Amino acid sequence: MHPISPGPLKTRAASGLKDFDLLLNEAAQRAPLGELVDIMDVGFTCAFLATPYARRLTGGTIYVDGGVHIMA
């Protein structure tokens, strides 16, 4: 099993949080790739893991966050 750890995502559920847009903008500025991922990036990772191309992966967390976790 490969846990997927997404970074900050703009979702309808989270959009009502106080200062949510400000937090997303700050996270995007810290991201080494210069932008945040979206829900499709997480979906593509899940789809990849379901293919034979991922057959040799043997555990570990897959970070789908544009590098945000390495800057924490």
Image: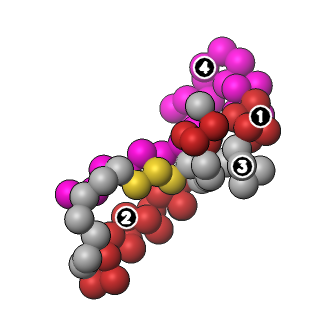
From the top left corner, tell me how far across and down residue 58 is, in percent: 23, 65
Residue at screen point 37% across, 64% down: 46
- Three-letter amino acid code at disc 1? Asn
Residue 40, horizontal then vertical, whole percent: 54, 61
In the picture, the quarter occupied by the C terminus is top right
Quarter of the view holding residue 18 = top right
Q: Is residue 11 visible?
A: no
* Residue drawn at point x = 54 percent, y = 61 percent: 41
Q: Is residue 33 left or right of residue 47?
A: right
Q: Earlier in the sequence, mark 2 or mark 4?
A: 4
Which of disc 1 and disc 3 is earlier in sequence? Answer: 1
Q: Earlier in the sequence, mark 2 or mark 1?
A: 1
How far apart are the alpha carbons under marks 3 and 1? Answer: 13 Å
Residue 17 - label: 4
Q: What secondary structure is found at the residue carrying circle 4?
A: loop
| Separation of marks 1 and 4 at Cα, in angstroms | 14 Å
Please, what is the three-letter code of the amino acid marked with disc 3?
Pro
Disc 2 crowd rating (10 Å Cα; few below 14, some 14-19, many 20+) is: some
Identify the residue under disc 2: 46
Label 2 to label 1, Cα distance in Å?
26 Å
The reply to whether the magenta stretch includes residue 7 is: yes
Q: Amino acid at mark 4?
A: Leu
Residue picked out by circle 1: 25
Q: Which residue is mark 3?
A: 32
Q: Nearer the viewer, residue 24 or 66?
A: 66
Rounded to the nearest angstrom, the CA distance separating label 2 from label 3 is 22 Å
How crowded is the residue under tag 3: few (<14 C-alpha within 10 Å), some, or many (20+)?
A: some
Residue at the bottom extreme of this rendering = 52
Q: Secondary structure at mark 3?
A: loop
Marks 3, 4: nearer the viewer: 3
CA gap, disc 3 and disc 4? 25 Å
Which of marks 4 and 1 precedes in the sequence?
4
